[in-house]
Amino acid sequence: MTKDNLSQSSARQAVGPGKAGVDWRVVFAFPNPVNEYAARITAGLVVLLAVATLLTGSALGLLAVAIGFWLRVLFGPRISPLALLSVKVLAPRIGHAKLVAGPPKRFAQGIGAALSSAAVVLYFTGFQPAAWILLALLIVAASLEAFVGFCLGCAIFGILQRRGLIPAEVCEACENIALRRT
């Protein structure tokens, strides 16, 4: 067996018999639909963490906020401790799920990931006041989601989809809702 055949055989064994490779769509899957109550609870937990971070000036808290957003945007609720707590423990106590489209929620998590990452960069490059301003903006957006049920990132997603900047195929349910409202 040549070295190339050996490495190909090892790669096949690593992913299982009959599998050609890793299905990255599964690795980076995001639920669709999502439970609105779980999303709101996660937002509430983000508010608690972000407020504690703002009050203490903690760099570790700021990193935790950013890492949490990245875990949720990349992997959905499967790895994020806050999302797991929301989905597996807290939301089931509410009772029935209220299902909503997943893509706008993922988009909102992406905005949170970008803003919190920018806050981390600002913090570690000596611009702490600017970092805290971005964190405060995240607190406002997460508070709207948690306490009012208004997802700012989802609203931005809807605007971008109506303008054709996000294709209708990304969220057909969103497109149908938009058509019903007009």
Image (spheres, helix red, strand yellow):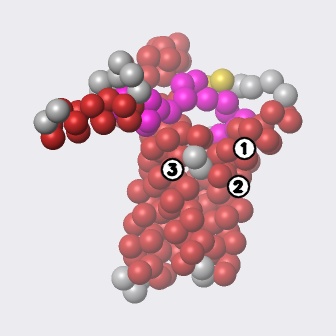
Q: Nearer the viewer, residue 30 or 181?
A: 30
The residue shown at (60%, 79%) is 58
Along the horizontal axis of the image, is 140 left or right of 178?
right
Tell me which residue sits at (44%, 71%) in the image: 120
Sequence-wise first label, 1 or 2: 2
- The residue beneath circle 2 is 45
Residue visible at 80% across and 42% down in the picture: 90
132 horizontally vs 46: left or right? left
In the picture, the disc for residue 119 is: none
Local crowd size for mark 2, using a 10 Å CA cut-off: few (<14), some (14–19), many (≥20): some
Element class at badge 2: helix
Q: Which residue is the extreme one toward the bottom?
A: 126
Label 1 belongs to which residue? 86
From the image, state whether disc 2 or disc 3 is nearer to you. 3
- For the residues labelled 2 and 3, the Cα–Cα distance comes to 15 Å
Residue 37 in magenta stretch: yes
The CA distance from mark 1 to mark 2 is 8 Å
What residue did someone put label 3 on?
71
Q: Can residue 137 be seen in this view?
A: no
Q: Is residue 115 visible?
A: yes
Magenta segment boundaries in residue numbering? 22-41
